[in-house]
Amino acid sequence: MRFCILQGQSGLEFVAIPKDHMYQFVALFRRLHKEIDKLTAGEVPTLPSVIAECSDLEMVSYDHEVVTGLDYINRLEATFVEIQEENYPLISLLTEIRAFQAQLEYLAEEEEI
């Protein structure tokens, strides 16, 4: 497991991502950051920035928690579904989010077996 540290408007967020999928997570954020300014909808979400990734993380503050990658991607997908976009092909961004979401869902199911 690896941990991604994100800096958003509300502060730092810590996301646990399977080691072999961290590259995809960071690449997804780079793509979203690249494309978000092209959206013309009135309500466009503000994306956090990827600050760092690490192999070990020991939380010493009770003010923060580590969120699973699947939970984070589920929230991200729900945020993008709500965008009322008419000019930019938002479906391409949603497709990328959902593809990564499906991979994480599969991994979660495999661990439960």
Image: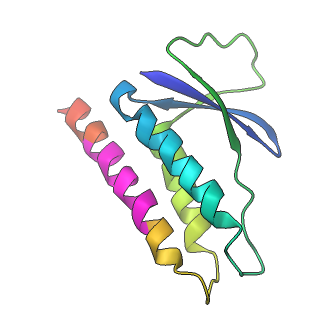
Q: Position of residue 35 (x, y in %)?
A: 61, 65
Position of the N terminus by quadrant: top left
* Residue sitting at the far bottom: 86
Q: From this viewpoint, which residue is outermost toward the left?
A: 113
Residue 8: % across, % down = 76, 43
Rendered view: 58 above or below 104:
above
81 relative to 63, above or below: below
Judge whether 28 appears above or below 68 on screen.
Answer: below
| Residue 21 figure quarter | top left
- Left/right placement of residue 35 relative to residue 106 reads right
Residues 8 and 106: in front is 8
Spot occupied by residue 36 in the image (x, y as percentages of width and height): 66, 65
The question of residue 102 being in magenta is answered with yes
The residue located at (52%, 40%) in the rendering is 26
Which stretch is magenta?
Answer: 95-106
Q: Is residue 103 left or right of residue 39?
A: left
Q: Which quadrant does the C terminus fall into?
A: top left
Q: Residue at x 76, y 75 (%)?
A: 43
